[in-house]
Image (spheres, rainbow, N blue to C red):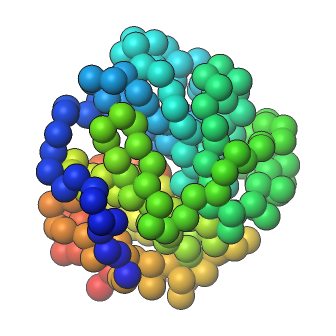
């Protein structure tokens, strides 16, 4: 069940820089989120195309403070080590996906991507914790189902959800890969994701943006 963390700002403060950049052969939506005042930033799901991500970071004159991974599928985590090497920022992932990380070579073979090498996680993040880029703070929601360690990032003040592969416009994440569970993803969607306000903008892990209201109304998997 979703509950706001006490003390979080619930109103919009500074304008938020938010670049969404589809990366790699599977076009994972990588988000660069930055604070216009402090120039601090976080990068979510740097799956590939790190050069393009770094170019956007340089254009906005941002300093990356953390690299957040919504789940340990190769198209979301494949470029994390390169980005860490370039920025010095720590990599954050929920510990329930550490087992999947050990299967990156197998994942690479499934999707025909080059093997990215070993990915080291600096810290686990889980429900109730927050991550911030300057004044822009996201609450971590643990939403297992697509994978055991899948998380979403909820920016309450900005009314935005970075959903990873849990929810898509008109669809939901697949549950037939190792660690997937249809029962768990349905529970995560109904108890946690759909508990958010209708006007929340959803940035899925792939494809176009949507809103919670739109998906509540028309997503065939949520009927
Ligand atoms: Zn995935």
Q: Residue at x 62, y 66 (%)?
A: 149
Q: Does 143 sit left or right of 196 as displayed?
A: right
Image quadrant in which the N terminus is located? bottom left
Q: Residue at x 55, y 74 (%)?
A: 144
Relative to 97, say whether 40 is above or below: above
The residue lying furthest to the front in this view is 7
- Residue 15 in picture, x, y percent from top left: 19, 32
Q: Does 53 sit left or right of 96 as displayed?
A: left
**What is the total number of numbered labels drawn onto the structure image?**
0
Relative to 73, say whether 36 is above or below: above
Quarter of image, res 215 = bottom left
Residue 115 is at least partly visible in this image: no
- Residue 39 in picture, x, y percent from top left: 36, 22
- Residue 78 in picture, x, y percent from top left: 69, 40
Q: Residue at x 23, y 74 (%)?
A: 216
Image quadrant in which the C terminus is located? bottom left
Q: Does 209 sit left or right of 182 as displayed?
A: left
Q: Residue at x 15, y 45 (%)?
A: 12
- Residue 44 in picture, x, y percent from top left: 50, 42
């Amino acid at each position: 069940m979703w509950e706001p963390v006490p003390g979080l700002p619930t109103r919009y403060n500074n304008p938020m820089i938010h670049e969404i950049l589809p990366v790699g052969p599977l076009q994972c939506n990588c988000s660069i989120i930055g604070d216009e005042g402090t120039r601090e930033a976080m990068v979510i799901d740097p799956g590939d195309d790190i050069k393009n991500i770094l170019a956007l970071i340089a254009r906005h004159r941002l300093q990356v403070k953390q690299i957040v991974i919504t789940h340990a599928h190769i198209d979301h985590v494949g470029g994390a080590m390169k980005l860490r090497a370039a920025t010095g920022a720590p990599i954050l992932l929920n510990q329930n996906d550490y087992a999947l990380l050990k299967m990156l070579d197998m994942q690479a073979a499934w999707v025909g991507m080059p093997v990215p090498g070993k990915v080291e996680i600096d810290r686990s993040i889980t429900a109730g914790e927050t991550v911030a880029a300057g004044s822009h703070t996201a609450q971590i929601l643990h939403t297992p189902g697509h994978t055991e360690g899948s998380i979403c990032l909820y920016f309450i003040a900005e009314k935005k959800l970075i959903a990873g592969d849990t929810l898509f416009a008109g669809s939901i994440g697949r549950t037939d890969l190792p660690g997937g569970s249809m029962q768990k993803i349905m529970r995560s969607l109904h108890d946690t994701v759909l508990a958010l306000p209708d006007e929340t903008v959803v940035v899925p892990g792939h494809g176009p943006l949507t809103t919670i209201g739109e998906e509540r109304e028309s997503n065939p998997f949520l009927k």
